[in-house]
Image: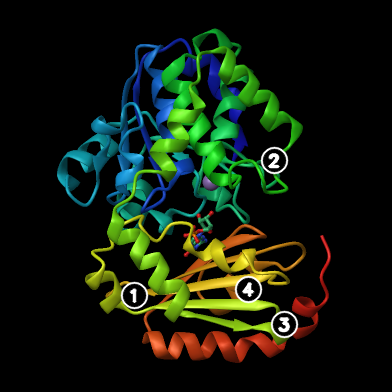
Amino acid sequence: MQAINLIFPELLNQPSRVVITTHQKPDGDAMGSSLGLYHFLLNFGHTVQVISPTSWANFIGWMPGCESVLDYEKETAKSDALIVEADWIFCLDFNTLVRTKKMEQSLASSNARRVLIDHHQQPQVEMFAYGVSDTSKSSTAEMVYDFIISSGRTDLIEQNIASCLYAGVMTDTGSFRFPSTSADVHRMVAVLKEKGLQHSIIHEHLFDNFSESRLRFIGNTLLNRMQVFYEYNTALIAIPQSDLIKYEIKTGDTEGLVNYPLSIEGIKFAAIIIDRGEERKCSFRSKGDFDVNTFARNHFDGGGHFNAAGGQSRDTLENVVSKFIKTLPEYRSMLTSYSF
Ligand code: 5GP
Ligand code: MN
């Protein structure tokens, strides 16, 4: 993988066919960074198409440009044709092609030059011609901002780009609270504000846009589905599929639930396991020096970041829960010593 800046001479001067893609079930950063780059690249006469491997949550739909995004699972033939014809494929907020699910084969076999912009650990570097991978970055949105700055075309940042990039960085920093929120992040937001960013509206779109039934689902989850293991400073939420049906829970409605247990005093490690029918999806979050990326890789076929990772299993919910509980003693000393 060569340095990303090498693509500027051609990318900024020669109109071409560009596909931008991201990980399955895109979150605020995945979609925000993709659409931020989309609006930027449109300025250069390119034909640009964002393709998401799957559908996305309703709370993301307000992002400018989202209405033009293709859902690969719904428009496979059209998406495959664009991938085959593309000159460039930008891969944002993921670093192993398997995270694009059914799109993996098309991406792998395309002759386009694949360009990586990502902040997760252990990138599959051999799959990308150019790219930047930096785990110290708060978000892929911040990295798209850096990319725009390096291109020398900061003048092209306008309200659409600012909204998308702000949504991305805000999502991935837990509203600017995680340790990855550097001085550079705040400087970036200052520049976005000067470009016309309206941040309050974005917070409303992302956090005050849910159904009554979702709020009642959260109430039920915290009351009846959470177990706290004080001897390991750990809490676990396990959600049966019947809850998702009863409360009409849609894609994205469970986003952020895993963070609730971390607000209990002393809890350092939180996990959620959701029975999604075809698989059991896990999310892990930690505070301080407990590495959930390694935990997810070792036990739940996943990965992510040091303090936020995910995984999955094909086993039953009951078995995944009992496997989780059985692994805790192995991490006892790490979980009971607490430092930031
Ligand atoms: P979430 O728990 O919100 O789904 O994901 C937390 C972080 O871990 C995100 O950065 C996400 O991209 C990453 N992640 C989630 N699931 C997986 C997985 O199955 N494999 C890998 N490698 N990363 C994951
Ligand atoms: Mn991200």
Residue 69 makes an appearance in the image: yes
Mark-to-mark CA distance, 3 and 4: 9 Å
Quadrant in the picture for residue 68: top left
Q: In this view, does 7 lie above or below 22?
A: above
- Which of the labelled discs sits on residue 331, or is there none? 3
Spot occupied by residue 112 in the image (x, y as percentages of width and height)? 38, 35
Q: What residue type is labelled 1?
A: Glu
Pointer 1 local density, CA inside 10 Å: few below 14, some 14–19, many at least 20: some
Separation of disc 3 and disc 2 at Cα?
Answer: 28 Å
Q: Regarding mark 2 in the picture, which secondary structure is present there?
A: loop
For label 1, the SS is loop
- The mark nearer the N terminus, 3 or 2, is 2
Label 2 sits on residue: 181
**Earlier sequence position, callout 1 versus callout 4:** 1
Mark 1 or mark 2, whichever is nearer to me: 2
Residue at the spot x=72%, y=29% of the render? 184
Percent x, y of residue 5: 61, 24
Image-based side of 143 in relation to 289, left or right: left
Residue 164 - label: none
Q: Which amino acid does the dot numbered 3 rest on? A: Tyr
Height in image: 235 above or below 101?
A: below
Q: Which-is-in-front pick, marks 3 and 4?
A: 3
**Given this view, does label 2 or label 4 mark the residue nearer the observer?**
2
The residue shown at (57%, 18%) is: 193
Image: 121 above or below 16: below
The residue tagged 4 is: 295
Q: Which of 173 and 86 is in front in this view?
A: 173
